[in-house]
Image (cartoon, rainbow, N blue to C red):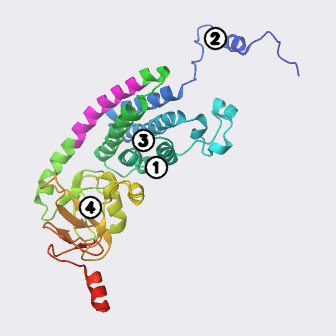
Amino acid sequence: MNSPSSDRSPTKELSDSQPADEAPAADLGFAPVSNGVDFLKSAVDHLLTSHDARSLKYGVLHLQAAIEVLVKVRLQREGWEQVFSKPGLAKLHDFERGDFHSVSLRDAFTRLEELTEIKLTSTKAALTCLASERNKLLHFGSTSDHEVVKTFAGRALDALSAFIVDHMVPGAPPDETEALEEAQHLIRHALAEIVIVTEARLTRLAPELDAWPGIVIHCPGCTQLAWTFDPNDETSCLFCGRGWGQEYGWEIAPLYAENILGESRHEAAQGKSGWSISMCPKCDEEAFVDVATRRDPNSFLTSACFQCGFVADGELGSCGDCGRTILDPEGIWCPGCWSYRMAKD
């Protein structure tokens, strides 16, 4: 086989093989931050013109891609090896070629929290809320309502905006500044449109929500104040349609604490923050939470058990020994501690 001439460059070969009136191929090189913003622009374009399922699908897929790229751009500032799935095996030449297995979004958040002073409890929940919808769209096709998917996207966009402002703009290298400014502009434009869609849906649901005889609380899934809470299998969120009756209360309660109250079980276990879930005085399951309601959305004076459905609007007591919630505000001990004391006597 004849070897190519030494003075024949790849660029010359390309130009010789192209018709005279055809423009050279575009440069496909993107800096990571520019790549993330490019995905974001595509996502916003699709979301704001998503009158069909195909546009909405690509809006969600590209938004998830934008989130992952931008979070990893921030993580990369802590060391290029951190964006590898296994930093200990990272090689610089693989990084420079982009030929490596990248860290997952969940692990990227964990590393950011471990390597910096950044606290991402509420941000993580919002930025990953789109993941399940993205997976359904990618593999099976989503069954969610068009407006609901847009609302999920809006929540993720809002959290991404806060992440950029709080954790990317400070200390950003000069070559990232312009792209980050463009990202913020894109998000503001998209949110203005999505908020209108969300509010219109809530307005349509208002008569049904107002007529609900029980309490209406925030849905831990879509975070809208539209969950018609009821201790039966039919309880569901009227906004996103998610049925909560088939799920265990002790699994729902942490979702509420994290997605609505912005708390972290991990930080609470380390004594760094509070944890609002307690044992229900009726069923003894750890699923009792203070909630805001549609009738009183600005306070958390109502308590509800996500397992048995018990709701308390009045003042409750606290056991003087173990601290668990009790029904009698004047009570001294819970039944367990009372029995223990009686047995000792």
Tag 2: Cα neighbours inside 10 Å, few (<14), some, or many (≥20)? few
**Mark 3 residue element:** loop
Task: Identify the secondary structure beneath mark 4.
Answer: strand
Residue denoted by label 4: 236
Give the mark nearest the N terminus, 3 or 2.
2
Residue 16 is left or right of residue 342, and the answer is right
Task: Give the quarter of the figure containing the C terminus.
Answer: bottom left
The amino acid pointed to by label 3 is Ile
Say what amino acid the circle numbered 2 marks.
Pro
Label 1 – label 3 distance at C-alpha: 28 Å
Question: Label 1 vs label 2: CA separation?
Answer: 42 Å
Q: Mark 4 or mark 3, which has the lower sequence index?
A: 3
The answer to whether the residue labelled 3 contacts the one labelled 2, judged by CB atoms less than 8 Å apart, is no
**Label 1 with label 2: CB-CB less than 8 Å:** no
Q: Are marks 1 and 3 in contact (CB under 8 Å)?
A: no
Q: Residues within 10 Å of mark 1 (few under 14, many from 20)?
A: some
Q: Which residue is mark 1?
A: 135
